[in-house]
């Protein structure tokens, strides 16, 4: 069965500093990987997704993620954080045999200090 | 397009009460699903539907019923609420549910408290 681990429950970062959120997955083959963001009181919004090809994926709001097969990781990065990036971030995976059923990680809550 | 809408936004129930969480989408999506979100556990799939008249169980279906009589609506029913069902519930939809690459669109959520 597929699974996703986000090791960091909370991360605090200063505005303007860089941000990296970790995501590790467990799946027998190459999965399809997603990052979603949930702003306070809102639903989830897709930031980016990886299916194949270039392992560095660009998303919305200046985010990018890198797929590393050897490490079973799909970490999310942003070079310079804005106060509006304070939110909860979820990594998710879909296996080829799982239809459209997403398996989510536990989430990482990002706090941005002025 | 309103996208995916959910009602109510917030609900308080007593143990044993029943209620229906509403979900509607206006994007003509075939695939709809319900998730619950609990702290530290991410979102877990409750039930899903690949089209009108077709539903199936997800990871945590116990205590919940669904039906899909129209493409637009996918209500989630709690027949006898329990405190363990206190959670935030999200509805999501995508075009067909057949292609893994499809983006799922999420509603704003319903926060449920069972006393």
Image: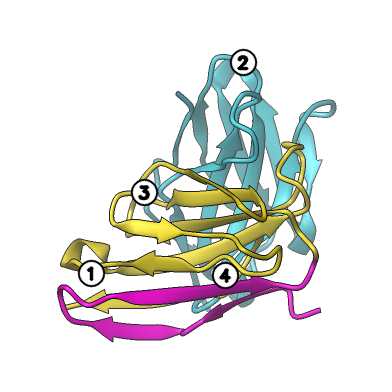
Chain colours: A cyan, B yellow
Could you say which quadrant of the image residue A81 lies in? bottom right
The magenta stretch is B1-27
Residue B109 visible somewhere in the drawing: no
* Mark 2 or mark 4: whose residue is earlier in sequence: 2
Quarter occupied by residue A55: top right
Instruction: Assess whether residue B11 is covered by the magenta stretch.
Output: yes
CB under 8 Å between callouts 2 and 4? no
Residue drawn at the location 26% of the way across and 69% of the way down: B86
**Separation of marks 2 and 4 at Cα, in angstroms:** 30 Å
Residue lying at the far right in this picture: please name it. Answer: A53
Relative placement, left or right, of A17 versus B103 is left
The image position of residue A75, as x and y in percent, is 60, 39
Percent position (x, y) of residue B10?
39, 85
Classify residue A42 as left or right of residue A1.
right
Cα separation, mark 2 vs mark 3, equals 27 Å
Gap in Å between the C-alphas at discs 1 and 3?
Answer: 13 Å
Residue B111's spot in the image, x, y percent? 38, 77
Q: Under tag 3, what secondary structure?
A: loop
Mark 4 neighbour density, 10 Å: few (under 14) some (14–19) many (20 or more): many
Q: Nearer the viewer, residue B53 or A102?
A: B53
Residue B60's mark? none
Q: Disc number at residue B81?
A: 1
Residue tagged by mark 4? A43
Distance from disc 4 to disc 1, alpha carbons, whole Å, reads 23 Å
Query: Residue at label 3?
Result: B61
Q: Are marks 4 and 1 on the same chain?
A: no
Q: CA distance from mark 4 to mark 3?
A: 21 Å
Q: Give the numbered dot on residue A29.
A: 2
**Which sits in the foreground, B63 or A50?**
B63
């Amino acid at each position: 069965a597929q699974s996703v681990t986000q090791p960091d429950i909370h991360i605090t970062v200063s505005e303007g500093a860089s941000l990296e959120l970790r995501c590790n997955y467990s799946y027998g083959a190459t999965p399809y990987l997603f990052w979603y963001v949930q702003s306070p009181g809102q639903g989830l919004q897709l930031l980016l997704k990886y299916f194949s090809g270039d392992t560095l994926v660009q998303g919305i709001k200046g985010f990018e993620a890198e797929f590393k097969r050897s490490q079973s990781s799909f970490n999310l990065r942003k070079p310079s954080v804005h106060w509006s990036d304070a939110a909860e971030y979820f990594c998710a995976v879909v296996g080829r045999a799982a239809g459209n059923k997403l398996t989510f990680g536990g989430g990482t809550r990002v706090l941005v200090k002025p | 397009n309103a996208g995916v809408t959910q009602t109510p936004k917030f609900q308080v129930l007593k143990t044993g009460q029943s209620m229906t969480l509403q979900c509607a989408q206006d994007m003509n999506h075939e695939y709809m699903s319900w998730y619950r979100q609990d702290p530290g556990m991410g979102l877990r799939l409750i039930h899903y539907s690949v089209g009108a008249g077709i539903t199936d169980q997800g990871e945590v279906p116990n205590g919940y019923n669904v039906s899909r009589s129209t493409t637009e609506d996918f209500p989630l029913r709690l027949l006898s609420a329990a405190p363990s069902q206190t959670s935030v519930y999200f509805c999501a939809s995508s075009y067909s549910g057949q292609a893994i690459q499809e983006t799922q669109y999420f509603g704003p959520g319903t926060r449920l408290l069972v006393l």
